[in-house]
Image (cartoon, rainbow, N blue to C red):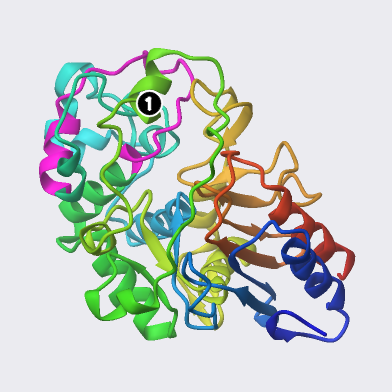
Amino acid sequence: MSISTGFVAAGFGPVRDAFEANFEDGLELGAGFAAYVGDELVVDLHAGSADRKGEILWDERTLCPLYSTTKPLAALIVAMLVDRGLVDYDKPLAGYWPEFAAEGKGAYTVAEALSHQAGVPGFIEPIDPELWLDPPALSEALAKLKPMWGRGEGSGYHPLTWGYIAGELVRRVDGRTLGTMLREDVCEPLGIDVFIGTPESEHSRCAWMLRPKESTKFGPMNDALKAAFLTPWAAPQRGGADWRKAEIPSANGHGTAQAVARLFTAYAQKGRIGETRTMSAETWDKLTRERVSGEDRILPGRVSLAAGVMRNIELIYGPNPRTLWHSGWGGSGGFGDPDARLAGAYVMNRQGTHLLEDARRSRIIDALYTCL
């Protein structure tokens, strides 16, 4: 008897088998997985519990915290401004946000900042953690930071600060917040159930996360890693109403698996979501081309980074190195394969310890590729 609910198209039964095997092996609390081939939804599965006590069923309306899987969704909004001629990836970020030029950061381009090269992955000196819930104030503090490495000296993943860079850029250029632009220009018109800045009216649908008992797997200790993740002020308290309502485009998107997968079809179809073209193919190329690669200062391994999305050089998301993807803290992830025109998303509330890979997610994605 199936333990999951939802839908799989003919020929995609192995995806359900893999999804359910994670539950049978005791690896999940609640989870969802969805996939599109072109414009066709071929998988939309959910199972388990949305709460920690097992009292609330995970269903098709459960909103899951996405953590860093939010970043490529926010990057789509910046790319839309590029497509409208309002932002240029190769011009200095300080041209749109003059205060960012402080402490020698005036030459960093938009693309460099969005590919984790700006040298400001966090605050090495103490700040009030509540500042993260006040994006204008946090952005003001961020702009004053001295970069922790020089321009052109590679990447260091910006787990939270990336979102304030992208968010402040959008606000300076468009006048609206990034979450508002996502809602008004994309999600509401297309009926996509994703939020960056989740209104209180939707909080009853949000899954509660179960953190792992083991420590997150980081690389070698250094000051950049410490600033990004390992100080008491590296993040706010997550999970409450204030966290959900704040707009943090790097880390606190909420969505269903189906909705997140639909947004990732923009990566699988070169800017198109259904009949809507969010950007030209030329802008999609600018968004997704490699901006930096190699060993990252903070993430444990070799990376290839575009302007807000990762490239699949290590084959973490299926067999195609041209796939665009991002993982979120604990295991969530989304991807778009432009050659197979395949997009998918995995969300869950039992968090794992790996920053990039997750065996549960890989099992499902591997099964998905066997069905093509």
- The answer to whether 116 appears left or right of 259 in the picture is left
Asked whether residue 39 is drawn in magenta, I would say: no
- Residue 135 % position (x, y): 17, 48
Q: Give the range drawn in magenta.
A: 135-162
Amino acid tagged 1: Leu
Would residue 112 appear left or right of 146 to someone viewing this image? right
What residue sits right under mark 1 in the picture? 230
Q: Dot 1: within a 10 Å radius of its alpha carbon, few (fewer than 14), some, or many (20 or more) residues?
A: some
Viewer-proximal residue among 70 and 85: 70
Q: For the point 46% across and 49% down, which residue is it?
A: 68
Left or right of residue 8, residue 219 in this image: left
Q: Where is residue 300 in the image (x, y as percent from the top left)?
A: 59, 26
Q: In which quarter of the image is residue 82?
A: bottom left
> Compared with residue 268, is residue 86 higher up or lower down, i.e. above or below?
above
| Viewer-proximal residue among 290 and 320 | 320
| Residue at left offset 33%, top offset 15% | 148
Q: Is residue 139 magenta?
A: yes
Q: Which corner quadrant of the image does residue 80 belong to?
A: bottom left
Which SS does the magenta portion mostly show?
loop
